[in-house]
Image: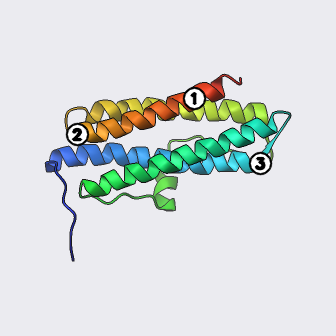
Amino acid sequence: MATITGPLTDDAKNTVVDALQGALVDLIDLTLVAKQFHWNLIGSHFRPIHLQLDELVSIAREHADTVAERVVALGANPDGRAATVARDTKLQQPEGGWQEDGKVVAAITEILSGISKRMYERIEATDEPDPVSQDLLIAVAKEIDKQHWMFQAQR
């Protein structure tokens, strides 16, 4: 069986893959949480928030794929399985049932704030061992920060 090798030393690879795997879990669960809110949203601001949640899902899915492919390029295996995401997520999970629009905006704002903080930690961790992965994480942080601002502005 063929194996994929990457350009980093084992120590650098371990550091970078840990950072990327954490980002992958954040992004996958962000898509799930945002869709859960999207499907159960109610309130007078339903339409714009409903559409904004779809935009957020698209951004998170695109970045999740890029992050996972970077893990593979480094010679490791990304893990986006449901059990892994459920075990490792740091995201606040929505309650069941209808979700009032103001509460959704507040919850998504908090979720994005947490993801942003963790992305900056990952950016710092990958500075020395892999500027390429760091650049990828910077792009993710840029989008997360923009979405955070856009949701926060609605509070």
Comes first in the chain, label 1 or label 2: 2
Give the residue number, with chain letter if any, for mark 2.
130
Q: Mark 2 against mark 3, which lies toward the viewer?
A: 2
Give the residue number, with chain letter if any, for mark 1.
148
Q: Residue at x 31, y 53 (%)?
A: 71
The furthest residue to the right: 44
Residue 96 seen in the figure: no
Amino acid found under the numbered disc labelled 1: His
Quadrant for the C terminus, please: top right
Give the residue number, with chain letter if any, for mark 3.
40
Comes first in the chain, label 2 or label 3: 3
Q: Residue at x 62, y 27 (%)?
A: 150
Q: Secondary structure at mark 3?
A: helix
Q: CA distance from mark 1 to mark 3?
A: 20 Å
Question: How far from the left and from the top, in percent, is residue 21?
Answer: 37, 49
Amino acid found under the numbered disc labelled 3: Asn
- The correct choice, above or below, for 152 with respect to 108 in the image is above
Q: Residue at x 54, y 49 (%)?
A: 29
Query: Relative to 14, is 40 on the left or the right?
Result: right
Question: How far from the left and from the top, in percent, is residue 108?
Answer: 63, 35
Amino acid found under the numbered disc labelled 2: Asp
